[in-house]
Image (cartoon, helix red, strand yellow):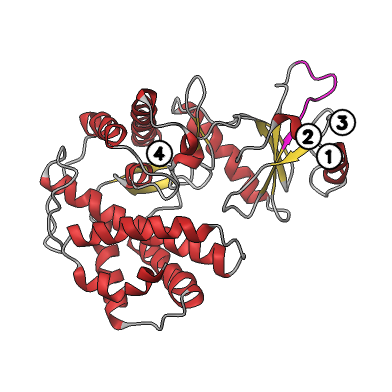
């Protein structure tokens, strides 16, 4: 849920939404005073702030409508199921107040994104809190299993994500011909990341999916699944949307590694990076391998947004993401893969 001013509610927009199939069926006390479209996000869903709701004293003064492109009973149910799972893990997410086959009404987490938080003394506390959330998800997953038990970021899925990058970023957006070196490098990377211990992860855990308030609220959580132990941490600290100050990153690393129970051996497939220096060698390597795959996967998402969806604002985020990927691959000694991906240097 991206931010829009609370005073930007439009009655005419609500009238349009109220006639949309899937919205009028919501078990909800209509009408509301108006609606405002919430801004930039990479989802195929649309988000609207609603409020206030006339005669509904038991509900918050502002709510969010999550609207899917078409009827998708499974996706709507998955959102609600995963929200319950996160709440059971002690993690704050938007509460669901109603659903139909195409839409949900959920709690409004407000406008303050971690992506926009100033780099002050409080920022390290926010990042330490974000690391505690990762640990809560992992601990609950070890006790209760995951909210989407049929899904896993295994070698097959990790490799498919890199195929998506090949299709939409390298070929579709940057018009680069396929290469054997890229194929082999992607195979090697997916195999190396597969060796990491698995824990439940949010899967898109970055500063635009964390809302700052009395406590952090997590959004865009519906695709949570088992994956590499460092997956959420590298999403947080190798953020595609903001630079994370050293002190904030150190605070998150200290919290995470102080409680994470994971023995990680050094892989012969890559060199051992020097950073993060606070981690032992196997963990440093596992962190870097996961970060490399995650950054290259994100480049596929940005390539799709620019080349297919026409959202050219994502090109700027892709430049930051390629810098992360390039530095990480160099720290692993994989200069051959950097060379095979050199087309990204033109971003």
Mark 4 or mark 3: whose residue is earlier in sequence: 3
Residue count near mark 1 (Cα–Cα under 10 Å), binned few <14, some 14–19, many ≥20: many
Viewer-side residue, 127 vs 158: 127
Residue drawn at x 62%, y 37% as measured from the top left:
3
> Residue under circle 1?
14
Tell me what residue is drawn at x 21 percent, y 29 percent. Answer: 258
Task: From the top left corner, tell me how far across and down residue 229 is, in percent.
Answer: 29, 44
Q: CA distance from mark 1 to mark 4?
A: 40 Å
Give the magenta-colored segment's residue range: 49-57
1 and 2 marks in contact (CB < 8 Å): yes
Q: Secondary structure at mark 3?
A: loop
Q: Which residue is mark 4?
A: 145
Going from N to C along the chain, the mark reached first, 1 or 4, is: 1
Q: According to the image, label 3 marks what residue?
A: 31
Where is residue 31 shown, x and y percent of the image?
87, 31
Residue 84 percent coordinates (x, y): 54, 32
- Callout in the foreground (1, 3): 1
Q: Mark 4 and mark 3 in contact? Answer it, CB < 8 Å.
A: no
Q: Position of residue 283 (x, y in %)?
A: 18, 45
Looking at the image, is 204 positioned above or below residue 94? below
The circle drawn on residue 9 is: 2
């Amino acid at each position: 849920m991206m931010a829009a001013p609370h005073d930007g509610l439009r009655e005419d927009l609500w009238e349009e939404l109220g006639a949309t199939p899937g919205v009028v069926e919501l078990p909800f006390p209509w009408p509301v005073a108006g609606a405002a479209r919430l801004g930039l996000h990479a989802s195929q869903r649309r988000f609207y702030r609603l409020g206030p709701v006339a005669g509904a004293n038991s509900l918050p003064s502002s709510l969010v409508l999550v609207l899917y492109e078409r009827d998708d009973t499974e996706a709507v149910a998955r959102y609600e199921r995963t929200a319950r799972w996160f709440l059971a893990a002690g993690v704050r997410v938007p509460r669901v107040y109603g659903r139909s086959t195409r839409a949900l009404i959920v709690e409004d987490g407000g406008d303050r994104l971690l992506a926009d938080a100033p780099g002050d003394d409080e920022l390290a506390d926010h990042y330490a809190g974000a690391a505690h959330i990762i640990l809560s998800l992992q601990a609950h997953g070890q006790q209760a299993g995951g909210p989407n038990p049929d899904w896993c970021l295994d070698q097959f899925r990790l490799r498919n994500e890199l195929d998506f990058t090949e299709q939409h970023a390298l070929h579709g957006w940057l018009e680069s011909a396929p290469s054997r070196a890229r194929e082999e490098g992607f195979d090697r990377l997916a195999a190396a990341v597969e060796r990491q211990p698995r824990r439940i992860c949010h899967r898109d855990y970055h500063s635009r999916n964390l809302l700052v308030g009395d406590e952090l609220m997590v959004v865009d959580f519906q695709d949570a699944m088992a994956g590499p132990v460092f997956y959420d941490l590298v999403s947080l600290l190798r953020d595609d949307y903001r630079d994370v100050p050293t002190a904030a990153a150190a605070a998150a690393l200290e919290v995470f590694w102080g409680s994470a129970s994971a023995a990680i051996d050094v892989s012969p497939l890559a060199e051992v990076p020097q950073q993060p220096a606070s981690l032992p060698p196997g963990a440093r390597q596992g962190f870097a391998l996961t970060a490399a795959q995650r950054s290259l996967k994100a480049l596929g998402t940005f390539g799709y947004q620019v080349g297919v969806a026409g959202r050219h604002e994502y090109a700027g985020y892709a430049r930051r993401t390629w810098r992360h990927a390039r530095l990480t691959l160099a720290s692993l000694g994989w200069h051959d893969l950097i060379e095979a991906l050199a087309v990204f240097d033109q971003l």
